[in-house]
Structures are given as structure tokens and as C-alpha cells.
Amino acid sequence: MMRLAPDPVAAILCVLSALAAVASIAALNWVIDEEPDERTQNRRKSRTVLRDLQQNCLSLRDVLKRLDRNLQLFASDRGSITTPIKFGVHALQVPHGSAALHQAVVSEIATLFDETSRNSFEVMALIGDGALDPAEEVYFQFAEMQERLNVLLINRLGLRETLDEGGQIAEALAGLVQALKADGVG
């Protein structure tokens, strides 16, 4: 017995949005003031926030890999894995026994989106407050990740290509967050 579930593109876009929240750190290079007006002391330590954000990126990579491994849940005769990303093209027929797996993946994505957005915001606030001072090159590397995410949306790659590229971007963002830690954290 099969069940029809929500369009998988919605879940994938949610993961890409979480990655975009991390990549948005790039914007600080062009908008941040030299000296912050006031520093907020009620945040977690830089090391903790960066560790959590790096783990978010790796978890997003892992969920994309899991989606890729279970691609048969996300493709049917009506929508193939090579069809360009578009709502309504990829029918999501979930076998009755796999419905729990599908819901677990969707719940994990929702949780990761929330955590990643919060941790990205906190890292950006730490940079804005002067607690972190990334090298200009790191900002450009975050901007490169933004561009790669934009290409995914503009070129409307197929489902499998989007999952693969999204996983590579997540891995690269985890490395950039590691670079922020290496730049010296209190």
C-alpha cells in the first residue's frame, strides 16, 4: 500500500535554505561597522556556537546523503531523479512501511533548519560585536557558497544533482565554520 506525501522539493529547499543561512555570513564583510556601538554579553561562547554551527552543516550534509540513498522514496514514474527541480513533478509515493522513515527525515530537516538559522544568527552577532574577526578571504569563500546555492536554484538541476551539490556545499560550509574557529576564538 502506498501513501502520497508532500512534494520532496519542499524538504530539499528547506535544507538549501538552512545552508543559505550559514552562507549569509558573507554579507557581514560589506555591511558591518568597524567598531560596534554596544556589545551584547548574553550570548553563548564563540567556541560553542561555532561548534554547533559546524555540526549543523555536517548534519545537513548527512540528511542530504540519506535522502540520496533513499531516493526511491522521492521518485516515481511521474517524476524522475533527473527531472529539473520543480514543484509537482516529483511524486512522493511512500510505501506504508516507510512512512515513519519519511516523517523522521522531514522532522530532522525542520529541526536542523531552526537550529542552523539560530546558530548562524548568533555567529553573525558575534562577528558584529567584534568577538570574532574573520579574515576577508573567509567572507569571500562564504559568498562563493551563496553563489553555488544560487546556481542550484537558477539552473534547476535534477533531484540527484541537487542532493549531491547540496551535500558538497554543506561540507564546504562546515570547513568555513572550522576556519572561523581557527581564526581565534575566546
Image (cartoon, rainbow, N blue to C red):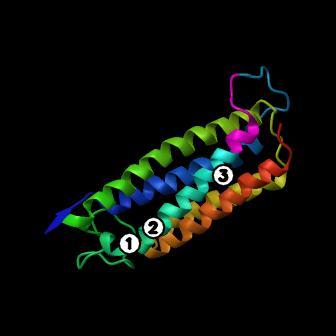
Quarter-of-image position of residue 168: bottom right
**Image: 97 above or below 125:** below
**Mark 1 to mark 2 CA distance (whole Å):** 6 Å
Q: Is residue 185 magenta?
A: no
Residue at (72, 59) in percent of width and height: 175
As shown in the figure, which amino acid type bears the numbered disc 3?
A: Gln
Secondary structure beneath label 1: loop
Q: Is residue 92 above or below residue 123?
A: below
Residues 140 and 174: in front is: 174
Mark 1 — residue? 70
Residue 48 included in the magenta stretch of the image? yes
Mark 3 — residue?
Answer: 54
State if disc 3 and disc 1 touch (CB < 8 Å): no
Q: What amino acid is at disc 2?
A: Arg
Secondary structure under the numbered disc 3 in the rendered image: helix
Residue 97's place in the image compared with 33, above or below, is below
**Residue under label 2:** 66
Residue interval drawn in magenta? 42-50
Look at the numbered disc 2 and give the secondary structure of its residue: helix
Which quarter of the rendering shows the N terminus?
bottom left
Q: Residue at x 66, y 58 (%)?
A: 173
Q: CA distance from mark 1 to mark 3?
A: 25 Å
How dense is the environment of label 3, judged by Cα within 10 Å: few (below 14), some, or many (20 and up)?
A: many
Q: Are marks 2 and 3 in contact (CB under 8 Å)?
A: no
Q: Taking 180 as reference, is 118 left or right?
A: left
